Amino acid sequence: MIVKLLRVEEESFSKTIDQGLSLVNSYLDDAIKAGSKSFSGSEAFLLSDTYGFPIDLTKEIAAERGLTVEEEEFDRLMREQKERARAARKNAGADAWAGENNVLDGVPATEFVGYDTMQTSGKVLAILKDGKCCNAATAGDEIAVILDKTSFYAESGGQVGDTGMLESDDAVVSVTGTTKNHAKNFLHHAVVKAGELRVGETVKTAVDRERRLAITRNHTSAHLLQAALRSVLGTHVEQAGQLVDEHRVRFDFTHFSALTAEELNKVEALVNSKILEGLAVDCREMPIEEAKKLGAMALFGEKYGKIVRVVSAGDFSREFCGGTHVDNTAKIGLFKILSESSAAAGVRRIEAVTGKNVLVCFNQIAGELHQAAAALKVNNPAELAQRAEQVCAELKEKDREIESLNGKLASMRMESLFAGAKQVGGIRLIAARLEGAGPEVLRMMCDRVREHAPDFVAVLASVRDGKANLAVACASEAVKKGAHAGKIVKEVAAVAGGGGGGRPDSAMAGTKHPEKLEEALAAAEKIVANMVK
């Protein structure tokens, strides 16, 4: 694992250096053209802060080209960046609760009873409307309701908040989400559907049961997933973030490379085996030291009190967690990984589904297979792979035939192009556009030019599949007189917003603006004339 991690870091740094070298040389070219004796500190900071290119390398490369880096400006920008980062970390927690705490000062914390029940009764302690406290709300009002007791789970720990209904004797309120503030007031974000809701009334709370059950399946599966990842990949794996809702689980974890298909299969199979084992899921509060002795995993950077809640799935998984869970892994049903991707440097992300959502996923895949089978005129989807291979082979053969025909057409046109070549500084120049010709045809035409006569230069262009290509060929005598295919193609391509290069006798380039090809070809005569002796 150590060797692999070192290799990944080396490869990543090499890519950073390659990208940075291109940028720093571009900036240096601009500075030299402008007659400057120094390299901008702001550009050096951009290279370091945005692209990860070390300032020491920037200084070294600049010195090789006779420039100094404006280090004072670089240092000033670096200090400002550090100050912004410190301020952001310092204020992140306080700012999040500032508005709510001001208006809810003195409101007691909400008692959460939703681990054991999805229905209870609670007293309305406060109603927020447009960010201010009010005594009552009527039909159509968008509000936040604070109760003394609730069965609604408030968004935290990566688990979304509950939705459902609040009902009093006079009002029906639809809860669209639940959050909590720093003072542990649960805010039921809601819309009054009917009647009038008043502070001091008692309401019945009813969580959307099906949604909650789907969320709990996903949350417990996230715990099983982390344990499975540590088992398959190694104990360096730690949770780096998660989002659990009724649709899927999104789990971020520390790892240094993409998972292979084999590793993903092992992880998925291990999670499903623990689901089928029907492990009892135990949730209990205990002193934090006792939890640590049991081996419960904590989130890095999280702050915990003296008493913590520990969620255990048999002996397979044991974590600190305040979320809601199934009481037996069998209730998850099935677990299916949808994707694995990069979330950040050194952090991977897995998205997965459980329970009924697995069936939805399977049905969707089955529907897409039947659509594909119908499009390829296959009666049995099981024969789809074989038919797809046949179609790919047929398409490749068609492409070869088309390429051959385009080559013949281009060869026929070359005869007229040779006859119409211009005399430029003692050599003959062809500058033409060959419609429908791909890069291979352009290369073949370049070979024809070099074989035809020693004093020819050809600048050929084409657009195919929306991509513009340029090819330049310089025969032997033309090269002796100063023609250089790589330099010619670079200057011609630049007219059409592209770039490229190559050998003195052969070069190719691409362009960003196919509509400027004619303008680029027209510039070829002057470019070649300035080059040949």
Image: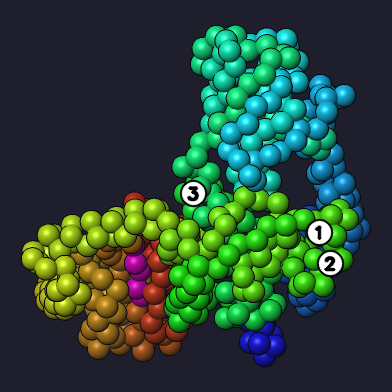
Q: Position of residue 505 (x, y in %)?
A: 39, 84
Amino acid at pointer 2: Glu
- The residue carrying pointer 2 sits among few (fewer than 14), some (14 to 19) or many (20 or more) residues within 10 Å by Cα, namely few
Q: Position of residue 223 (x, y in %)?
A: 61, 64
Residue topped by disc 2: 290
Distance Cα–Cα, label 1 vs label 2: 7 Å
- The residue carrying pointer 3 sits among few (fewer than 14), some (14 to 19) or many (20 or more) residues within 10 Å by Cα, namely many
Distance Cα–Cα, label 3 vs label 1: 27 Å
Q: Quick one: 521 or 401, which is closer to the camera?
A: 401
**Residue at point 17% right, 72% down?**
382
**Residue at point 42% right, 63% down?**
334
**Element type at mark 3:** helix
**Residue at point 23% right, 76% down?**
441
Query: Where are the magenta residues, as a range?
Result: 468-472
Residue topped by disc 3: 214
Q: Is residue 381 left or right of residue 304?
A: left
Q: Is residue 470 magenta?
A: yes
**Element type at mark 1:** strand
**Element type at mark 2:** helix
